[in-house]
Amino acid sequence: MDQFFDPGSVAVLGASNDPAKWGFWLSAGALKGTHRRQVYLINSRVASIQGEPTFGSLAELPETPELLVISIPGRGVPAVVDEALAAGVRAFLIISARVPDAADMAQRIISAGARLVGPSSLGVVDASNDLLLAWGNFTPGSLAVVTQSGQLGTEIATLSARSGLGISRFASIGGQSDVRAAEILTSLVDDEATTQVVLYLESFTGGSALVAAMQALRAAGKPTMILTTGQSDAGARLAKSHTGSLTSAMDTVDAACRAAGAIRLSTPGEAVEFAGYLATSWLPAGKKIAIISDSGGQGAIAADRAESHGLRVNVLNTATRARVEGHLPLAGHIDNPIDLDGAGEADLSVHACLVDELLADESIDSVILSGYFGCYGEDIPALLDAELAEVGALGETVRKHRKPLIVHSMSADSPAVAALWENSIPVYTSIESVMRVVAGAGFYASHAGRITEALERSGPVTPWGTGYAAARDTISAAGVPVPRAQTVKRGTELVEVMAGSDLTPPFVLKAGWPAHKTELGAIALGLRDATALKDAYTEMVARLGEGEYIVEEMDTRGEAVEILVGGRQDENFGPIVMVGAGGTETELYGDTWLELAPVTHAEALDMVSRLTCYRLLTGWRGRRAADLDELAEIIVSVSRLIAGSNEIQEVEINPVRVTPDGALAVDALVVTNRDDESDDGTDDNSSSDSGSNTNGDGSDNGKSDNDGNGERESR
């Protein structure tokens, strides 16, 4: 990526003297790096731009530039690119939008062995290399920004400058016609100036490469914060299984973040406030926090907000409480939160004393100081020195314990607030920001990333044909336990099949071809004997027609919890495995968790523990605990099945009936890339058909055109 972030020479096509035009800012920025590289400004209408001579065309340049920046009306870009390729240009940064036949143009660039950032890019910046090819000014710093939306990236850069972080690199990748986010992220691993990365993407094409790049950044000690949009996935509406329809695109991005050791945030402001925390403080060991406040109301709200973010505000243990009471003999509330009750005004040094006692407690992971601290010297100048001295004492305390102390202050920019940041103590004016950051830090600390095993994909692994019998064979071969069964194929007789069978009633009869059976009456449960089975078969064939039917032994074990286990191929991130509450209420509860596949046994157990219905599996109201290890093995088997097949698109087992005596898959659906996509007359997203104790089936990119010498219609 050096040709984009540290080129030996740069030419700006569309250079301008008009500050309202893109060509002006690109020219001004490029000229700031003339001590490091040769800069050429191209404009056929004027002799000089910003005091520098211009060239009338690319052909007039004394050399072929290493990087050509194009900011002209989009309609003129393809011809210029062809001319530049003929001249030997091998790196293009295209600011222009609305370029006709942009995909064909990009392919010509790639075929020539050249590289392209854009079109519709808002530029690139590298502070260490004095490269500024973007609109506006960028404060040098340690945060890298890689973004599909140029203007959103500029907002992040602006907020970063205000926070004191600044920008190391900035890359607006636009349409990603050639250079993609993963390549730029990989280049940041060894960039000494970059300590953190914010990534904004609207498309996660090539998601596996993105995960690998973020894993490399995490290993290098460089946190990645992701911003994205879209809470739903239109493709999920077309899924045949609940595995596709019950999860959103955001669920998959979150799974990718966990695998990559990255964290997804919601807004540019959240990303920058979290980056400020990570640049300053230590990561917490867990979710247990202590709160100190000089206001009962602020302390109570802090506790409420903490719990809403999944943090734990536990009562102090006896020893810590006794030590705290020694510093607050007159306080009325010593539990957690701790109300200073005027002690802070009486003696500022009480703050550091209390923080020291709390951070020394191994059962406390972080301390929150909320309220007036930071305002004493601002409101009462005579107290400034004392407050700053207390900040220094707090700094020594956190460095000694190497645990986080975060301050919620009513002042935004007092001398004490600035000193707190300098002493590795983050400060925020909103208690919501404090709790969001602490919770995020805990998440980041506990998700360091995981390397998914790369299985060799093979196929076919499913029999030719579709339906339940084929799905049974597929999951059984993968190691998933299923009930004993007999298949009545088209052209065979039920009596003949059952005559040689040793199946034990009660039976379940299923038509093998519908994806979802209840709506069609394609399942009969609790058939007590051969006569009941024959009657049900005769009625079902008369109504549904000839086809493949399956007779199973009905699972009648008690204390069963119905769980859904599924997998699918995600178009961006590859194989995904999911677990969730199963049965007829699957969609009602929407209780699911997914990860990139394959997973290990321990990871499968962790997935199950994330479900709300997990408590049903561990012994709800005196029931015996279910066999979690057997369930985990089924999850592992499905994850390896979907990750190891080059033909399976979706697999779903709903339900897996999990009891204290083991787990059994009593319905399955497998969708392959050979399957007929014709409608079977049912709603593909209809609810599962199992019941209790039964075998049922269960980028804006700033995309405005350039006008004249690099002017965009809007930003």
Image (spheres, grey):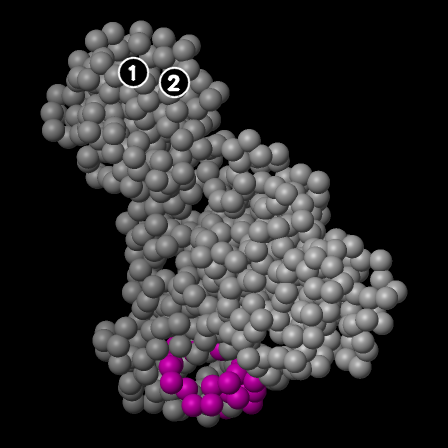
Q: CA distance from mark 2 to mark 1?
A: 8 Å
Up-down relation of residue 707 to residue 634 (above or below): below
Up-down relation of residue 711 to residue 276 (above or below): below
Q: Residue 24, which numbered label?
A: none
Task: Indicate left or right for 652 with 31 as reference.
Answer: right
* Mark 1 residue type: Ile
Q: Residue 334, which numbered label?
A: 1
Q: Residue at x 84, y 58 (%)?
A: 502
Q: Is residue 107 magenta?
A: yes
What is the quadrant of residue 338 in the picture?
Answer: top left
* Towards the viewer: 96 or 71: 96
Earlier in the chain: of badge 2 and badge 1, it is 2
What is the quadrant of residue 228 in the picture?
Answer: bottom left
Up-down relation of residue 583 to residue 660 (above or below): below
Q: Is residue 679 magenta?
A: no
Query: Do the residues bearing badges 2 and 1 touch, measured as CB atoms within 8 Å?
Result: yes
Disc 1: CA contacts within 10 A as few (<14), some (14-19) or many (>=20): many
Q: Residue at x 37, y 28 (%)?
A: 313
* Mark 2 residue type: Leu
* Residue 575 rendering spot, x and y as whole percentages: 63, 62
* Residue located beneath label 2 in the image: 316
Residue 628 visible in this rendered orientation of the protein: no
The single residue placed furthest to the front in the displayed view is 531
Q: Which residues are magenta?
A: 83-109
Residue 156 visible in this rendered orientation of the protein: yes
* Residue 219 rendering spot, x and y as whole percentages: 59, 46
Q: Residue at x 17, y 17 (%)?
A: 342
